Image (cartoon, helix red, strand yellow):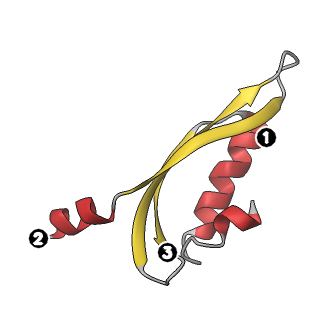
Amino acid sequence: IADCLSFIDKADRPIMDGMVRACINAQVPYEVEVRAYSSRGTPMRLRVIGEAIVDEDGRTAAVVGAIRDITNEKRLEAK
């Protein structure tokens, strides 16, 4: 989880961490918008979604999801 959180703004990391952990531990799907930074340090806004894949015993086998850059959408909304 720590590697995935490294590009997310420090203020948003606890929110994202809690959502991912809830998904892993209790199969709670998540959708959240977070502030992040590109590898060059450019600020971004991301929409992150995820859900658990469970095995035949009902345990979380994996978490799958997607990350979408919504920076331009947020800029347009602000105008």
Which badge, 1 or 2, is on the more N-terminal residue?
Answer: 1
Which amino acid does the dot numbered 2 rest on?
Lys
The numbered mark at residue 79 is 2
- In which image quadrant can residue 33 be found? bottom left
In the picture, the disc for residue 10 is none
Separation of disc 2 and disc 3 at Cα? 23 Å
- Please tell me which of labels 2 and 3 falls first in the chain: 3
**Foreground: disc 2 or disc 3:** 3
Kind of residue at badge 1: Asn
Mark 1 or mark 3, which is nearer the start of the sequence? Answer: 1
What's the residue at 17%, 69% (across, down)? 78
Q: Position of residue 38 (x, y in %)?
A: 49, 75
Residues 9 and 18: in front is 9
How far across and how far down the image is residue 18, in percent?
Answer: 67, 56
Residue identified by numbered label 1: 25
Alpha-carbon distance for marks 1 and 2? 40 Å
Which one is closest to the eye, mark 1 or mark 2?
2
Tag 3: amino acid: Ser
On the picture, is 29 further left or further right than 46?
A: right
Q: Residue 62's image quarter?
A: top right
**Residue 1 spot, x, y in % from top left:** 75, 59
Q: Is residue 57 left or right of residue 52?
A: right
Helix, strand or loop at label 3? It is loop
Residue 18 visible at all:
yes
Classify mark 2: helix, strand or loop.
loop
User: Neighbour class for label 1 at 10 Å: few (<14), some, many (≥20)?
Assistant: few
User: Could you tell whether 12 is left or right of 35 in the image?
Assistant: right
Most extreme residue toward the bottom, as rendered? 41
Query: Given the current orientation, which residue lies at the most extreme top position?
Result: 56
Provide the residue designation for mark 3: 38
Q: Find out whether the residues at labels 3 and 1 contact each other: C-beta distance under 8 Å.
A: no
